[in-house]
Amino acid sequence: MEFIILLIVVVAILVLPLKMAAVMLGARNTGAFYCLFALLLAVIIQRFVGGMIPGVTAEWGMLITIPLAAIAYMLVLGTGFLKAILIAIVQGLIMIGAVILFGGLLAA
């Protein structure tokens, strides 16, 4: 039972920032399952491309990750490429803020 609750919390923490960013920037498909599928597709694309390019440093990996995630967001969320890049950046910022907030709450 604890594992199921943990899984729901982790999925919510991953999907909600993407959903919020997609709604803020006006994507056509903003449902929770669209966002979950977009995240899964982004991970699959990033793993596939990451396997083709060995030895990528953390800095270059971040520069490669944003456009790859934007491709997945563009395909699933029904938006343009530049707007998908903005969605990826805003989603990352919301996720970082949420992690800092939740970490601060748990540490207190």
Image: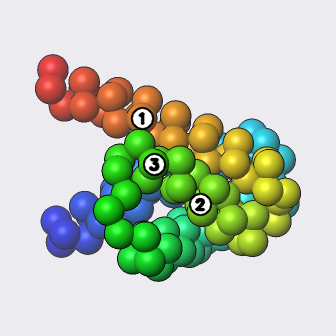
Residue beneath label 3, please? 60
Q: Is residue 53 visible?
A: yes
Q: Are marks 2 and 3 in contact (CB under 8 Å)?
A: no
Disc 1 is placed on an element classified as helix
40 above or below 92? below
The mark closer to the camera, 2 or 3, is 3
Amino acid bearing label 3: Trp
- Quarter of the figure with the C terminus: top left
- From the image, state whether disc 2 or disc 1 is nearer to you: 2
Q: Residue at x 46, y 40 (%)?
A: 95
CA gap, disc 2 and disc 3: 14 Å
* Disc number for residue 21: none
Mark 2 vs 3, N-terminal side? 3
| Between 53 and 3, the one nearer to me in the picture | 53
Mark 2 sits on what residue? 69
Q: CA distance from mark 1 to mark 3?
A: 19 Å
Residue denoted by label 1: 96
Where does the image place residue 39, in percent across and percent down from the top left? 53, 66
